Amino acid sequence: MAIVLALAAAVLFGAATPASKLLVQRLTPFQLAGLLYLGAALAMVPAVSRRRRMVRLDPPNRARLLGMVLFGGCLAPVLLLAALRMTPAGSVALLLNLEIAATAVLGALWFAEPLGRRGWFGVAGIIAAGALLSGGSWPGIAAALCVVAACVCWGLDNHLTALIDGMTPEHATFWKGAVAGSANLVIGVTLSRLDARGWEIAAALLVGALSYGVSIALYIRAAQQLGAVRAQALFASAPFLGAVLSYALLGETPTPMILAAAALLLVSATMLFGDAHGHRHLHVAIEHVHPHRHDDGHHTHAHPDAAPSTYHSHPHRHDEIEHAHPHWPDLHHRHEH
């Protein structure tokens, strides 16, 4: 189920690149980023309003939420939209594969997500493909640097998202969209007059609702179950979809170098996703809340009204356990080696 969620999130997010390329011609990057994330918040209102109030977050989780808002909601989309103003959408879409490399490197260095030799080769291939896509000339290099910076921000966002404990994906998406969207829109209208027509503003809100609202909520659920690196590996299909849509709908033409880079990206992302990990490990006792089901070997508390394979969310306690099985980094497998 988590794999399906990650792929659905990728489809919605991939469509945002060509749509944003059209909208950013009439809106500044700050204005469009603000509208996109406000649209994401609006998409979450029905889900947030019908759920019980979220558990009060402790200081570490409040810090993670703040980091999500700052890096993933405020900085990353503005950098991406700035790149879209400088270069074709197809190239920008493919460059977004750098996000998986950024997520993997950050995970290996600071977030205790092990990465084997195969994974590091995948990261190297993605970086090499990104260099090919920059074209080695201006403004391609400037656009590529903007996308690199955006991907690093989203890489941090991915790890902080996977670590959030005590907040539903819908609440996290709502607050991220509402706070980041409002901040960027205020900055945008302060720096430049809002000249877009009503239908363009509505279109931006709709793109945000689907590509940054529903997509982010689906991704959060996938990341909490798969871990940031592996969920991002599935999410890496979004750039390829964005490139295909850009070529089909915007009349852009892929060059032989772009096609070669796309092939290298595909192989590299597959290598990174296939990086295996397994060992004997200890789970200390912990109490938290997150979406889970009861057939995963980590949730043994009884539920008379919930099927073992059904995802649900509530506060629950894990007793200390030590066992061995193949696993990916997630809320229950974040440890040093």
Image: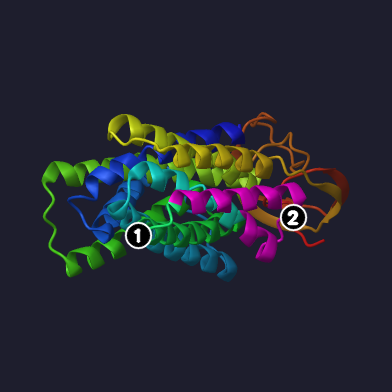
Instruction: Decide: is 264 above or below 112.
Output: above
Q: Residues within 10 Å of mark 1 (few under 14, many from 20)?
A: few
Horizontal arrangement in the rendering, residue 178 relative to residue 196 (left or right): right
Q: Is residue 25 left or right of residue 324?
A: left
Q: Mark on residue 114?
A: 2
What residue span does the magenta drawing correspond to?
104-133
Indicate which label's residue lies in the foreground, 1 or 2: 1
Q: Quadrant of the C terminus?
A: bottom right
Q: For the residue carrying disc 2, how many other residues have a C-alpha within 10 Å: few (<14), some (14-19), or many (20+)?
A: many
Q: Which residue is mark 1?
A: 138
- Asked where in the image residue 306 lies, by quadrant, the reply is top right
Instruction: Name which of mark 1 and mark 2 comes first in the sequence.
Output: 2
Query: Is residue 314 visible in this depiction of the protein?
Result: no
Q: Residue at x 70, y 53 (%)?
A: 120
Disc 1/disc 2 C-alpha distance (Å): 37 Å
Question: Which quarter of the figure has residue 255?
Answer: top left
Considering the numbered disc 1 on the image, is that residue within a helix, a strand or a loop?
loop
Query: What amino acid is at disc 1?
Result: Trp
- Indicate the secondary structure of the residue bearing disc 2: loop
